[in-house]
Structures are given as structure tokens and as C-alpha cells.
Image (spheres, coloured by chain):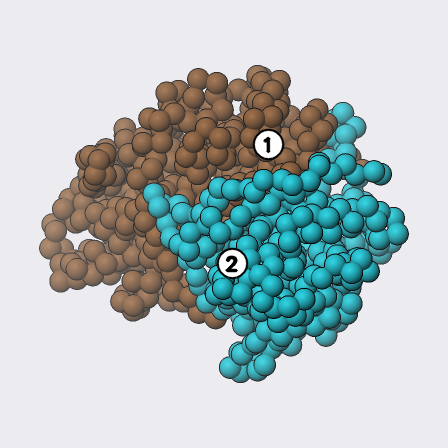
Chain colours: A cyan, B brown
Amino acid sequence: MSKTSKKNAIYGQSGGVTAVINSSASGVISAWREHQDEVGVLYAAENGILGALNEELIDTSCISDDVVKNLRYTPGGAFGSCRYKLKNLAENRQQYERLIEVFAAHDIGYFLYNGGNDSADTCLKVAEIAKELGYPLQAVHIPKTIDNDLVITDNCPGFGSVAKYVATSIKEAGIDLASMYATSTKVFILEVMGRHAGWIAAGAALASDNELSPPHIILFPEITFDEEAFLHKVQAVVNQVGYCVIAVSEGIRDKNGVQLSAAANVKDDFGHAQLGGVAPILANLIKQRLNLKQHWAVADYLQRSARHIASRTDVEQAYAVGYAGVKYALSGQSSVMAYIKRISQQPYLWEIDCAPLTEIANKEKFMPRDFISVDGFHITKKCREYMEPLIMGEDYPQFKNGLPDYVRLTHVKIAKKLQPFILIK
Amino acid sequence: MSKTSKKNAIYGQSGGVTAVINSSASGVISAWREHQDEVGVLYAAENGILGALNEELIDTSCISDDVVKNLRYTPGGAFGSCRYKLKNLAENRQQYERLIEVFAAHDIGYFLYNGGNDSADTCLKVAEIAKELGYPLQAVHIPKTIDNDLVITDNCPGFGSVAKYVATSIKEAGIDLASMYATSTKVFILEVMGRHAGWIAAGAALASDNELSPPHIILFPEITFDEEAFLHKVQAVVNQVGYCVIAVSEGIRDKNGVQLSAAANVKDDFGHAQLGGVAPILANLIKQRLNLKQHWAVADYLQRSARHIASRTDVEQAYAVGYAGVKYALSGQSSVMAYIKRISQQPYLWEIDCAPLTEIANKEKFMPRDFISVDGFHITKKCREYMEPLIMGEDYPQFKNGLPDYVRLTHVKIAKKLQPFILIK
């Protein structure tokens, strides 16, 4: 495909949103506008790949430069995201052929997909089917996930901000406990996201600058939960410090590999299974076994949408992978991901490079064992050195009437050219 | 007592801490230092009234002016707070007599107590026993409570910041849902504090600038929880908007006046009562009855310690009541509270005045019925107008290594002069 063919592009947001995915969108749109003489129109698919399948395409040229700039400061997915994984080619070829049909109808030469593991896989498959059908397409993946579990990239846009949020939150709650523990709460538990990888829980550890400062205990999904060792540790910390602050990954598992939140099988009076939350389970355990007063919090969506306390480093990296994604696509790259490469630790320097999606899709990066302390309850110096630069810097949104003044996009969609898509299951 | 007698003072922090109680401490210490030629030493009681009883007195003159200034930016109670209510005079006169004994030993002429309802009561009783025993003392109460339930004062220091936190959080989580609801979560529930009064839940409503924007439903302890009406409303909002965002007070009650979190009587497999959390109960209800995908968060201590997103108005008012408290004490006032008086709504203007504690102690200010919408699920324009000024302005702490750089005080305590206090029960 010639670079001067003035092809159009589709950009899509996928999976759980983050505080900074719109910064990537801002990078994509800004880079595209810099090349306006060489390219056509940049469309955003509404709700990710679903918008591409259903021909729900938003014309980004209707968005003012000011709004594009302000997208950098707005959490969530401005164009809508989705939890929708395309089946593999053999199982549902129809979906892929439909995508190519939509691309052809709208003269799409570039597909920019912004998401985590599943979207890397989608992006790769779209590139493969295009190649197979002889449709000229540059498909580039732009990484995004608070889970920080993509391989190759040093870290994932979205992670630095959630780490900053959980570390700030646990630092503040720790100060609260330090003020009150003499007559009140002795143990505080913050449940954070992370079903498989413990990166977010590890982020909380950044609040602790010495052995006695909160958080005192981190529970990772990578480490089998040992009830007795945990209770022993809690009591030891309370004896030494007076109180104990804990960060726990939602996905911690028992020795049978069963998630605690599922294993507890908590039921209400009607026999209904009670919904999730490992924090109340641990709180209950501490109350029953140690008889210590405790409190617990579940951050849930607050952590991944907390743009008000985003990491400036994260915001800049999210922008940079979006911006670079367009550059790679326009320079003829395909089936690649724009990723963050750490150049130096002191001072912290990074650049964007690209790597083949075949090396990235369907792989998951867990906490390495040497990032977790020997006893399994905290992070190591090596982990701290890795994470510290990722939460550096603040990048406050504008405020209006006391609240963040986030951008709201009107989705100006283009006319459909095809019949509605009906998925044959 | 003469104003020129160079008497000493005791300042104490009491009850659940807030993001801005140390701003009041900063105001107290700053005002005291302005009068250093007329007064003696300002001591801070460690852990509130307990420090006074046990003669654990911190010498605030050892704290540098810089640290005093930075206390304004630090959450929690820098001198330690306590949950400890003095019994009434008839029941335990010994405690009150001990206080006067400590005051006399350290030449205390001023008692400045910083807290909520219980501490207003403590402050009043201390003033009464001093008077009864002929001990010259100016006892002044400095208001503090995220619950916003003290009477006379327009609002309570601590409330504006928690309201700003919950409104910001629910605004951000609402944007998250708006991005994802097409294929994922339809209902999000944020549980906030407020066992008796719904002010904090009402604060969340500030995020909503029109009928369709989150939060769509607020549940107040003042309004009896009606399961059917609630479920009907949730479904109606989902039908209209596509998703539904809910803020709920931890203290909502059923028609028998029983808190939902207690009434549910949730038990784990061992028959243990599961600890608190009304959010998971509502989430379960929504899942069982409406079959909608939901998520829930419990903010717990995060909300009251979130200094990083404090309201500048709140920080300034907290400082002002502390500062004025000293002025009132030095000018010979006693048994009074320094309170916030709203002078004008547009522009928002306020000043500090003082009122007798007899009119304040043991009274509780609930949400007036005309602050809650007719259907009981939201706030009225009147409530919005009252709350809006309270969250105005930002007042960011300094950051270091990506996290707020909060002050940590070393408690330099003075030598004890008395025998240890043994409470005879």
C-alpha cells in the first residue's frame, strides 16, 4: 500500500478502560492531524471492535483541537470500549470477513487498536485475515492495561496511574490508622484489582518507605495464600507497629488454586451466593481469629478511573504509544505493537519502539519471583526500582465548580454503507 | 483569669480523623504563636482526651514553623486522636477531677478540643467541672467531622473534602461505566460513610449536572429503604440511560429501622457473620432480581483521609476555626464552639463566630427533608446550592517521588509530674 494513497483509518478502544487511554487517543488523533495532507479520515469505532463490525464509525475530524488536547485529561474511553473477544478464525471466519468488508466500504488502510492482551490478539488476527484475503491493511496495536501484564513492553499505559492511586490511597489510610489505632482500628485492608497478576497490589507498596510504614503486608495472586502464615504476620505487625495496613489483589488463591472470593462461598439468608470482595473475607478472618478491630475498602472502578491523581509519566507514555502507533502504521508497519522501552534507570529515560504482535498476543507477564520478598508479603528493592519511575509526576485536570472538568464527546457518526451485521453463531 | 497570666494550653484531636483536622491544628498553633508574649506553652494531648488524662503532653513549641505550615497539607490526626467518650459527671467524676489535676500540674488555662458531637460534649463537661471546682479555664470546642452533623455551624470542617472526594470518585466511575456499559457493567454502587446522616452520600450528588448524569440514585439513612421502589428505579434508569450509578450511605435502614448491613445477616460457610458493607448487599439484590451486571466499591477510610483531593474551602475553614478557637479562648470565652457562618450565597462568603456549647453538644443535624427529592433518591436544588461552595477550590499537597509528601511529627513529650492515672470503673 502506498503511503500517499490517502487511505482512512479506524481507531478503537478495547477492554477495561483506564485513567489514560484517552491520552493515547489524543496521541493518535494528534499524530494523524500532522499528516493530514497524506492521509484520509480517522474514524473511531464506537465501543471498540463492535463499532467496526456494526459500522458505527465516529468521524474524529469533527473534534476540535482543543477537545483533542483535553482528551489527555479525561478518564474512561471517550469513544466507548467493549468486552468482546473475537473468536478464532476457524471458529468464526464470518466476523473477520465482515471487518474486511467494512474496511473496504470505508477505504480503511489503517487499523489502530488500543487495549490489552485480548486486543493484541484481535489486532493480530485482523492483520492475518487481511493478508489472507489480500486486503492492504496496516494493523497496529497500542497497549493499554492497568494490569501491566503485557510482555515486551517495559510497562503498560494505565498501570502507572493506578499504582499512583493505590499507593496514595494506602499512604493516606495508613496515616488515618496511625492516628487512631490506640483506641480504634488496628487493621486496614484495601482490595485492589488484579485477577492474575499482582502488579497493582505491588504498586501499593510504593507508599512504604521503611519496614514499619504502611502497607505492611501485600498479598499477590502469584503467591499461594497461606492463612496461618498471614494471620501470624498480621499479629506480628500489630505487636511491633501497633497497627497493620494490608493491600490485597482481588485474585489471591488458596493452595488448590481456587480464588478466595470464590472459595469462601459466602451466602446470605436466602442462600444466595454473596458477590465478591476478598477484603471482607480477610477482615472476617482477622476478626474471628485475632479479635482485632478492622476496616476494609474495595477500590474497584475508582482505581482505574482516578484521572485526578494520574501519573504524569503514565499520561505521557500513553500519549506517546498512541502517537507512535500512527507513525508506525503510516510508515508501513503492520502486526506490531508500539511499546515502551526503558533506556536508563537513573535518570529514568524511555523511548517508544515496535515489536511483532506474534511475540505479544496471548502472553501474560506476572510478577517475577525476585520482585516479591522471600516471605511473599512485600516487594523487593528490585521491584521498587522498576516501579518508582512509573508514578512520577502529577498532571492535574482542570477543575470547574470544584470537580474535574472532563471532556464529553458527541459521537458524530458517518452514514452506514452496508447492511446490518448479523452474527451467525 | 487574667489574659496576661501566661497560662499554658492543651489542644486535643478527637474522634474519626479527617483530611483537614491538621489544618485546624495548624491554625491553633499559628494563632498561639502570634500571642507568644502573652501566653505560655501550647501542649498537644497525645490521642486526644486520653493524653490529657494520662499526662501524655506533646510540646508544640518544638515544632518548626515550616512543619506547622505543612500540617495544613497532611491528613489524619498528627497528635493522635481517640474514640473515647468521657462518662457523665455523675457516673465518673474521677476522670474529670483527674483532668483538672493535670491542668493544675501544668498550669493549663486553656483547653481547645477539636472534634465532633462527642467532643463537643466532652469540652462542655470539662468546662462545667472546672467551674464547679473553681478552676479557671477557658474551654473552646473546634468543630471537625466528615459527617457534617453538628448544629449551629453552617457546615463542619472535614465535610467539604469528603464531599469533593466522593463526587470526584463517582464522576470518574460514572465515565468508566459510560464507556463500557454496552457490553459490560450496567450498575455501579459506591458505599460511603454516614451511619445516621446522609450528608456524604448527598455530596456524591454534586457530580450530577443533569437528570441523566451519574450518580442517578442516592440512598440516604434519613429515607427508609424500600427494596421494590429501589429496584424499580434502578431498572428505569438502566432503561433510560443504559447504566445506573448509585451512591449509598453505609447507614441505610429498612422499615423496621434496622441497618441493612446488619439485617442481611450474611454468614460464611463457618456460620460466622460476615462483616458490613451495604454495597455488596445491594449488588447482590440487583443481580438476583434484575440480572444486571454490577460492580461495587467501598471507600471506607480512603474518603476521610484523601487529602490529595481536599477542598480548598474546607482546608481554609478548618484552619480558620482552629485559629479563631485560640482567639476566643484568649479573649476569655469558654464553653463555646468556633463555628462557620454563611454570610452570603452568591458570592459565597463566610466568617467565624462562636456559639454556646450547651446549644450544640448532643445534638445531631440530619439532612432536612427539603434537601432530598420527593422520590427520596436524589438531592434538591436547595441542597445543591448549600453544598456546592463547600467543595470549591483545590489545595494540593507537595509531592515527592510521585506521592504526597505528608508531614510526620515526632511527639516530643514533656516530663510527667503526676502518678499514673488508674480509672476506677
Q: Is residue A277 above or below residue A70?
A: above
Q: Disc 1: which chain?
A: B
> Which residue matches tag 1?
B242
Q: Chain of mark 2?
A: A
Within-10-Å neighbours for mark 1: few <14, some 14–19, many 20+: some
| Residue drawn 75% across the image and 46% down it | A98
For marks 1 and 2, give the one nearer the viewer.
Answer: 2
Residue at 57% over, 82% down: A344
In this picture, is B224 found above or below A296? above
**Is disc 1 in contact with disc 2, using a CB cutoff of under 8 Å?**
no
Residue A109: x percent and y percent?
A: 65, 59
Q: Indicate the position of residue B320 as horizontal and vertical percent values.
A: 24, 48
Position of residue B261 in the picture relative to residue A349 (left or right): right
Q: For this rendering, which residue is in front, B262 or A306?
A: A306
**Which image quarter: residue B30?**
bottom left
Query: Residue A29, which numbered label?
Result: 2
Q: Secondary structure at mark 1?
A: loop
The residue lying at 27 percent from left, 28 percent from top is B359
